[in-house]
Amino acid sequence: MCGPARFGCRLTLAFLAFASVASGRVSADAPVPEVSATSVAGFFGEGRLTLLLRGYYMDRTFAEAFRYPEVENAAFVLGGGLVYETAKWHGASLGFSAYTSQKVWAPPDKGGTSLLKDGESYSALAETFLQWEGGETTVRLFRQRIDTPILGSRDFRMVPYAWEAWTVENRSVPGLAIQASWVTHVKDWTSSVFVPIGEWLGAPEIDAATGLLGVVYESPGKAVSAQGWIFQTQDVLATLYGQVDGRLPVGRELTLTISGQGISQHAVGAAVYPGAKSGIVGLRGALGWKGSELRLAGNVSSRDGAFLNLFGLYPGYTSIMEEDNDLAGERSWLAGFTADFTPLGAPGLTLAVDRTKSWVSEPALGMSALDQHEFNLEASYRLQGPLKGLRLRARYAYVSSALDQGTIYGRDFDDYRLNLEYTLPLSTILGK
């Protein structure tokens, strides 16, 4: 079925064979109830239905630069989604999710926000999956959300990414989670249809199906955690990602966390990125106290090439609201803090500030030789009591001398965003 060269598919099949012998019960924050094999009404009627209400305002302006006019991206949209999963029958359940983004204000000459489809309102059926839970193993088939450090749902606009895939997860070993997926199609932020990954990448002549395998470990007491991932996109690229985190109590409810990461990529075949190669390492330190955090981080990229962000996610420690800082030969550092106001009597209120600096000591022809700076400010409030589930968030970013904008003087831009999200389990108003 997979073919002799399809590494990711064979990898997933091998994991399926292992997972099928697992036993126990899968843990979940809100498990879907088990129903009788004869209760069709119970199978659908005792499921879980959640309403997601969302509003988003975005205004990003790129300043005029050498040979580049001023450009503004702006829109205000309202929408959200419905997420439904049936009850379980002999461990099997069905899941669906549908989203919409409706234009309130969006000037036709200010597109580029990824909030609308070609500047207009749109809707999409994101998830339609069959899931089976048996012991400590979960199998999910067809269109679904997947969340890993490299390939994920990117759920920070109006409509998340979704992937056509089959996925197996297993937690038979305490503290250890294993995931394997074979992914063939994608629906991104502004699309209503699923397309093959190759077509989405601009190479319709290849399938570019992607096999992934991830292992995540967390020690008792969460003192140490580690994760390793393999992503193999046929005829395109192989990506390896690893991360280790160590947590040490240092007294008076203070916790010191030291983290390290490594990313490696190389071309697979010569279909899309022949000869592509890159490597990135990072180190992060954070001091936490009652939800607040002071952090420092740095990333260093090899001179072989820039990180190829096939799926829109880059997990580098110095990647914040705008710039990933993942170009060939790029060095970057981050300093930031998050203040949680719960200890001061304002539960749900947080304020975060991040500052990065990055540079390329030997810039490529046409790249700015200036240092790039980014400043981020975010205020977030999660309401309590009857409106629990409602979050308001305001974000601001300013970038000076952006290195990835193709101008020898860099490019400045700023970005304002207001975001409202309300997650409402409908059982709370239906009286279930």
Image: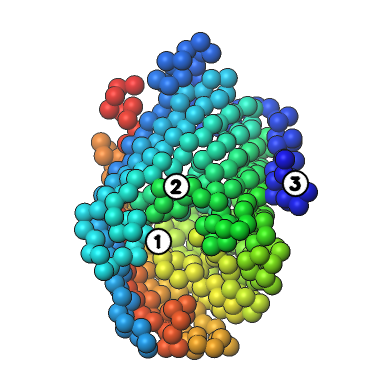
Kindly identify which numbered label has been placed on residue 193: 2
Marks 3 and 1, how far apart at CA = 49 Å
Depicted 75 relative to depicted 381: above or below: below
Nearer to us of marks 2 and 1 is 2
Depicted 368 relative to depicted 249: above or below: below
Q: Residues within 10 Å of mark 2 (few under 14, many from 20)?
A: few
Residue at (25% x, 36% y) in the render? 386
Q: Amino acid at mark 3?
A: Gly
Position of the N terminus, as image quadrant, is top right
Residue of label 1: 338
Depicted 144 relative to depicted 394: above or below: above
Q: Identify the element where label 1 is drawn.
A: strand
Camera sees residue 8: yes
Residue 83, position in %: x, y? 40, 36
Q: Amino acid at mark 2?
A: Val
Residue lying at the far front of the rendered structure: 205
Residue 400, position in %: x, y? 38, 80
Position of the C terminus, as image quadrant, is top left
Q: Mark 2 vs mark 1: which is more N-terminal? A: 2
The quadrant where residue 239 appears: bottom right
Depth order, front residue of 220/352:
352
Residue 309, position in %: x, y? 55, 64
Nearer to us of marks 3 and 1 is 3
Q: Residues within 10 Å of mark 3 (few under 14, many from 20)?
A: few
Q: Mark 3 vs mark 1: which is more N-terminal? A: 3
Q: Mark 2 vs mark 3: which is more N-terminal? A: 3
Q: Residues within 10 Å of mark 1 (few under 14, many from 20)?
A: some
Classify residue 102 as left or right of residue 44: left
Q: Amino acid at mark 1?
A: Thr
Residue lying at the far top of the rendered structure: 38
